[in-house]
Amino acid sequence: MNADDMQTKELEERARGLLGESVTRVDARVRSRLNQARHAALEEIAAGQRSFWRRPLFMPATGAVAAAVLVAIVLTAQFRGEGALPVGEGGQAFDDIEMLADNEGLDLIENWDGNFYEWAASEGDEHVDGTSG
Amino acid sequence: MSAFVTLAPVYSMPAVTPGDVDLPDSSSKDRTRALNQFLASVEVKAFKIAQIALRHEDDALDAVQDAMLQLARAYGERPSDEWKPLFYRILENRIRDVQRRRMVRNRVMSWLPFRRGEEDDEAPDPIEQAVSPEPAPGHKLELNEAMQALEKAVQALPKRQQQAFLLRSLEGLDVAETAVAMGCSEGSVKTHYFRALQTLRAQLGDYWS
């Protein structure tokens, strides 16, 4: 090995040592984020082994099919007039579906103040009775 | 902004435990455990390689995360001794993608002079870049300077030389594994690596002598 090769070899060794040292200096924050990334990759494997229909690709499609079936059942009941569902006057089924799909409906249920509405209804009845009678 | 996910608690997960993932049989768990060990063994070096190539911490983290995900998705079932070169092959592709995107973005930005100021948002934080006021011991200071000089010189290498040098010197891949990772012949790896050493010697020789 000549002097030129020796110098190159020396540089190679020193560079390896420094790069190795730089790896040990990677801070805890970065290591933590790498840890999270690794965990996500392992989750990916677990997700890949879930049952066929639970795969994320099919979940939206399955949900859409379920929604379509629900709509079909409601409409069929509406047009046949079987009364299988508590369907009121014409078009009310659509209102029901809309209400089911409406997130605000849930807020209304969560914040339900039954006493107030009962009182308001009785007041309304009295008012109607009073004006009519 | 980084697209990094936050699925695990900070500073956790030294190894995969049975409750971590919902797998149907023990062979799958063994494979997951093996993949976890493999990724844990390469992640910091991979980050360092990506950081030197991209000069940006978040981009480097994203590239490593993408490579991990891609390996798990596409090659998780492959024999574990194939993982390392495949992983670095994916990582090199991700690094190249980021570099290309930057090139395109810079080209577009050059046509939009009024947006140049926005690029400053991505410049390194001067406070983070500032030298720590704490006096470092002499040896540590020397080491820091040598490390910075080396990283700067490696960053200035042509891309293929940089890849060959980092995969061989930092990750310790052999010539055959480096060839798989770089998608070229073993002869090309030897050539790129040799030229990288020559270039570094020319740049650092005076500094290190």
Image (cartoon, coloured by chain):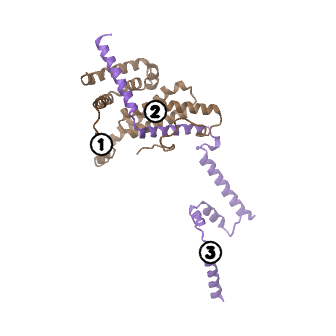
Q: CA distance from mark 1 to mark 3?
A: 67 Å
Q: Which residue is mark 2?
A: B43
* Chain letter of the residue carrying label 2: B
- A3 left or right, relative to B14: left
Q: Residue furthest bottom?
A: A133
Q: For chain A, what colour was chosen?
A: purple
Residue at image point 34% right, 17% down: A9
Q: Is residue B113 shown above or below A130?
A: above
Q: Which residue is mark 1?
A: B110
Residue type highlighted by circle 2: Glu
Tell which of A129 and B49 is nearer to you: B49
Q: Which residue is mark 3?
A: A115
Tell which of A98 and B4 is nearer to you: B4
Residue at image point 74% right, 65% down: A83
Upstream in sequence: badge 2 or badge 1: 2
Q: Is residue B161 at least partly visible in the picture?
A: no
- Residue A5 in the image: x percent, y percent? 32, 14
Q: CA distance from mark 2 to mark 1?
A: 35 Å
Q: For chain B, what colour was chosen?
A: brown
